[in-house]
Amino acid sequence: MSNLFKYTLRIADSSLVLGQRMSEWCSKGPTLEEDIALSNIALDLFGQANGFYEYAAELDGSRSKDDLAFKRNEREFFNHQLSEQENGNFGTTTVRNFLHDAFNFLFYTELASSKDEILAALAAKSLKEVKYHLRHSSNWLIRLGDGTNESNLKVQEALDFLWQYTGELFEMDEVDNDMLDNGLGVDNIQLKIKWDELINNTLKKAKLKRPIDGYMATGSRKGIHTEYLGFLLAEMQFLPRAYPDAKW
Amino acid sequence: MAENETVWEVFIQSKNGLAHKHVGNVHAADKVMALENARELYTRRNEGSCIWVVKASEIVSSETEDSEAFFDPSNDKMYRHPTFYNMPEGSKHI
């Protein structure tokens, strides 16, 4: 497997898994308007995943994009552990998405100038949507953090819990380093500086306390996940696995 | 719907230069949320280039019971319609 393939697959996996999480909100949103907003974000993420899987399948040569999405097991998925965390309450979802959107926004901004034209184009296309996602989650974070005592408490709790999954976003393994050295990938270490700034600004507006960096979960680059991914995949993959030749 | 959520009327401009048209309404707690909700509900299929949201309570409307006084008098004033002119042949877009 080439590093370009692995790199592309990781991006696709994070989009797909977060998209699947967001789709769980469909029909359960706090208001009709928000329900539609959450489902729209899910669809945006599926669209992004589709683009990256298409490219990954082309690089792979033997598997289709559907094979990649629906016929790999948990240990063969490389999405960030943050993206697979459960929706929890609306505040938990807001915090998870905010942390992820801030990363995605900066990541795609950099990836848009990759020497790989297809990655660059996919990043530029995704960026437009991610800008909106970040705006949506930031606004809600501020609204909830600077809302009532109860709403502040809930998002602060979510932030304290989810913080452990943010370290992984900025890791560099041999794939990342190789991609970076060839001008194809993103320098995640540099990204962290901008991410910190973005996060700190918004947390301040939201009257939330930035958690202290403690234990940081790791492993998704090697296919190691939290207990939640397996259940998510089981639900997502059931139909195409039970009826492999099913057509719409 | 929560008590503190207001109704906002939504107006979409489909193209630069055209008038904003009323398309419906949304619930939202503040103007930022109103604008975002309007974007989600009414511009999913590339309908617009600009959105206005206005608090429904801020709109001043004529009352149904006033409609006779407001609108009927214009019915019998045919001279207000430019229907008595002969159009020159070949003129377009009129």
Image: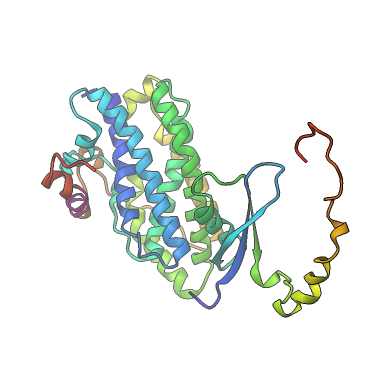
The single residue placed furthest to the left in the displayed view is A242
Q: Main secondary structure of the magenta part?
A: helix
Is residue B62 rendered to the left or right of residue A56? right
The colour scheme applied to this rendered structure is rainbow
| Residue A139 % position (x, y) | 53, 57
B12 or A150: which is nearer to us?
Answer: B12
Q: Residue at x 23, y 39 (%)?
A: A69
Q: Is residue B25 above or below residue A172?
A: below
A60 or A211: which is nearer to us?
Answer: A60
Is residue A22 rendered to the left or right of residue A112? left
* Count of marks, rendered view: 0
Q: Is residue B29 above or below residue A58?
A: below
The magenta segment is A229-236
The image quadrant that residue A158 belongs to is bottom left
Q: Is residue A127 magenta?
A: no
Regarding residue A174, the answer to whether it shows in the image is no
Quarter the C terminus of chain B occupies: top right
Q: Is residue A59 above or below residue B24?
A: above
A134 or A40: which is nearer to us?
Answer: A40
Regarding residue A104, the answer to whether it shows in the image is yes
Is residue B82 rendered to the left or right of residue A126? right
Q: Residue at x 39, y 24 (%)?
A: A118
| Residue A44 % position (x, y) | 41, 45
| Residue A90 % position (x, y) | 39, 64
Q: Residue at x 25, y 28 (%)?
A: A57
Q: Is residue A233 magenta?
A: yes
The image quadrant that residue A36 belongs to is bottom left
| Residue A108 % position (x, y) | 44, 35
